Image (cartoon, rainbow, N blue to C red):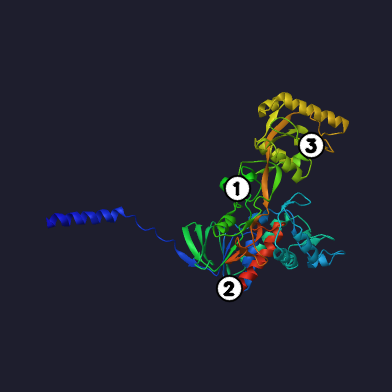
Amino acid sequence: MKKILSILLAMVMVFALFAVPAMAEEAPAESAEMVVVGGGAAGLNGAYKAAQQGVKVLVLEKMPFVGGASMMASTGINAGSSDLQLATASPYTADQFYEYALSWDYGYDRIGYRVVPVRDDFAHTFAYNSADAANWVASLGVEMKASDDSHSLQLVTKENGAFGAVYMSKLIAAVEEQENIEIRVNTRATEILLDDSGAVCGVKAVGPDGEYVIETRALLLATGGYASADSAFFQKYAPEWDGYYSFGHAGAEGDGIVMADAVGAQLLGIDAITATTLTVGEPNKAGALSLASVAKKGAVLLNKEGERFVNEAAGTAVVVDAMKAQTDHQAYLFATDAILAENADLQNVVNRDLAVKADSLEELAEALGLDPAVVTESFRVYAENAANGSDAFEKEEIVDDFSTGAYYGVLVMPARRICTGGIVTDGMAQVLDGNDQVIPGLYAAGETTAYGAHPLSASTIFGRQAADSIVAYLGK
């Protein structure tokens, strides 16, 4: 009997050994004085300035290269009282910039960009640190000019590329010379870790060799915007923007916002997105092709009912809002071969077989699934108005009355581009929770924050401010 019990006991122990799942191994850990998530203008400015002050910095970039959306910036930076501005006949000052920043509110600015309101201390830093930031950019060798009474500083020449490409190439070169900075590409941060007191104590990351933990007391979120985020992101944070195309950087997927939200950060204005008016693309994916220039050079927009609904040459805000009101937020852009011959953007779309071609408007309407009778009537009225010089939508110049073809049609939709909402930070670039309290050790800068307006400027100014705040926090 004892022998039988011994055998049964042994069998139970063996069964238990194999039945109990093995404990998952904890991700390996390492440490860094400061971790920066994102290698665009905000992250690299923060990394550089902190490194200059003796901090060992680790930069995590999920893309195979650094530069981010900042590389795509076509215009310059904004400032008040910079050296270049003070040398003009009528300088734009930091005081003026401060009053301007305080005026930001939900809605469109003068050129159709969405803006969000910012805190007073945030506006103060934006304005009164802007001169230092502009002078720093100039010190990198970026040749800029300032106009009288203007907060905008532009490149002297674009022979070497647009502003963002020139600026970022200089900044990346400076960062690469810093011994205190390590950059890891193809490495995505996935979770912010807090200790029992609610302060940052680390970050989880996934790289080529798997998941691991980086212990740190100071974390700078600089992951850029969220124009290329997926449907799940927009369904949670801004459902009215779900399904649109993206004209943004492929890496702009809202990572920083999602991670910050998970630890109680305050968010503001996620629906404040500036769109490119007319694009060809795929829902919730980067890489949309713009046809905005075609609409301003003679193309006509018809909705899915075959009717015109807007002045195609109107400003960004007007066209985007009109498009958003149409069925599926889409419309068909019509052009003739004469318009095609004058527009490289449309030629690009046609060469990629993304447009439909036909010899008549009736044939094109049928190919696009529209009612030929409605389409031809829309163009009859358009031609009649062109002859009378009185367009129904107050279009001032009608380049082509569409009386002769071939004709081209392509389905277009606005594409998300610049995001001005995001994580709420104070003037020290510290992340605030829902009670306006600082989350110790957590900082954010650039387009991942609710920065108001001017993303390249915000990235530069607050990336540098975050570095100063982190240096003080670490007691360096």
Q: Residues within 10 Å of mark 3 (few under 14, many from 20)?
A: many
Of residues 338 and 438, the one nearer the viewer is: 438
Rendered view: 433 above or below 253: below
Q: Is residue 62 visible?
A: no
Identified at 58% across, 49% down, the residue is 236
Q: Residues within 10 Å of mark 1 (few under 14, many from 20)?
A: many
In the rendered image, which residue does mark 3 sit on? 298
Sequence order check, earlier mark of 2 and 3: 3
Of residues 96 and 129, the one nearer the viewer is: 96
- Identified by mark 1, the residue type is Phe
Q: Residues within 10 Å of mark 2 (few under 14, many from 20)?
A: few
Identified at 53% across, 66% down, the residue is 198
As helix, strand or loop, the secondary structure at mark 2 comes to helix
Of badges 1 and 3, nearer the viewer stands: 1
Q: Quadrant of residue 18?
A: bottom left
In the rendered image, which residue does mark 2 sit on? 474
As helix, strand or loop, the secondary structure at mark 3 comes to loop
Rounded to the nearest whole Å, what is the CA distance between mark 2 and mark 3?
Answer: 59 Å
Of residues 309 and 55, the one nearer the viewer is: 309
Image quarter of the N terminus? bottom left
The image shows residue 212 at horizontal and vertical percentages of: 47, 61
- Identified by mark 2, the residue type is Leu
Sequence order check, earlier mark of 1 and 3: 1
